[in-house]
Image (tube, helix red, strand yellow):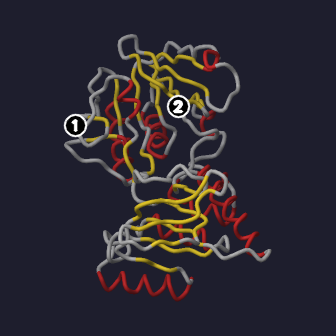
Amino acid sequence: MADVVPSKKEVIVVVGDGMVGHRFLERLRKYDTSKRFALISIGEEPTQHYNRMLLTEYFEHLSLEKLKLSPSNWYAENDINLLTNAQVLALDTTNKKVLCQRLGDDRPKGELQFEVAYDRVVIATGASALVPRLPGTNLRGVFVYRSIADLNNIIAHGEKQAALEAAGGPKKYALVVGGGLLGLEAAKAVHDLKVAVRIVNRGSQLMSRQLDADGAKVLHNEIVNKFGIDVLYDKSTQDIIGSEEKGVEAVQFTDGERFDDVCMIIFATGIKPRDELAHSSGLELANRGGILINDYLECSAQGVYALGECISHRNATYGLVAPGYEMADTLAKNFT
């Protein structure tokens, strides 16, 4: 693909077409009354982005359109150049260029790379699902709960298992590792696929950050009695057992207990900032991960900014969308 040629306007490239990146574009278009900016949004997924907070609803209607953050024509109507299915490999902060690569294409690698010139670039790459470093996490049947692609893979795997059991095959369980809100959503979604579910929680109660002991007990009873989902407490996974041919078959726990009736594992154990782009571009990173920014959302290179889940500010990272929206609004105002 040929390089993307900028206009005479000041070019702002947003890396990451997620909820926070979209909010920044929306606000900047609103505040840029003189229309002095040319906007380019680069996203890795093959479609314009969607509301991750509504992912569980996808199991009910399987409609990506219902999850989109805006109508399909929103980018064109707002004169925003949207590049989907493209990964940003690095920033050339000296020459102010973004090195990109097309994804999902069979052409030679050299033909897939292209550059986008910028005046300012905003990194909004978000976060990725945290997968513990355990043996067996690369086996077929191990998933995270983060994107539409993840959900489609979970649905396909669950439907296959449900069909096997309906044909007389042995009952097997999906293990959801993590007793937070995301883990509970994943457990309910798999339950609706007619696959038996166990929630594996490292702590002594569900949703420990949101509920007190009494509230957690009510939630536990609801999950067990209404949905028939087993909940295991004070459990830590030690080893995922299986083979390349059969995929996941069993799980070994640190307390010595082992389950041999496992068909699927879904990790819902938190997130980590996606700061690989900053690393490949020579930007400063926080000691615990995350792109280091100052009070003005500026990175360590001139003309480079970052916001949302990928950043670290004063040793703090943010795993919620609300702080990211605030950053997006602030940066859009600062630009205008």
Residue 288 placement, left or right of 329: left
Query: Mark 1 packing: few (<14 Cα in 10 Å), some, or many (20+)?
Result: few
Q: Secondary structure at mark 1?
A: loop
- Give the image location of residue 251, x and y in percent: 49, 65
Gap between marks 1 and 2 measured at Cα: 24 Å
Dot placed on the residue nearer the N-terminal end, 1 or 2? 2
Q: Please give the residue where the numbered disc 1 appears in the rendered image.
A: 295
| Residue type beneath disc 1 | Asp
User: Which quadrant, please, contains the N terminus?
Assistant: top right
Q: Amino acid at mark 2?
A: Ser
Q: Residues within 10 Å of mark 2 (few under 14, many from 20)?
A: many
Q: CB under 8 Å between callouts 1 and 2?
A: no
* Residue of label 2: 41
Q: What residue is at 41 percent from the left and 59 percent from the top?
A: 269
Callout 2: SS: strand
Q: Residue furthest right?
A: 167
Give the vertical position of 311 relative to 35 (above or below). below
Which residue occupies the foreground of this view, 219 or 171?
A: 171
The image position of residue 176, as x and y in percent, is: 50, 67
Q: From the viewer's perspective, tell me whether residue 13 is left or right of residue 209.
A: right
Q: Position of residue 234 (x, y in %)?
A: 34, 74
The residue depicted at 24 percent of the width and 47 percent of the height is: 316
Q: Residue at x 39, y 56 (%)?
A: 270
Q: Position of residue 287 (x, y in %)?
A: 23, 39
On the image, which quarter does residue 107 sit in? top right
Q: Say which of 281 and 78 sits in front.
A: 281
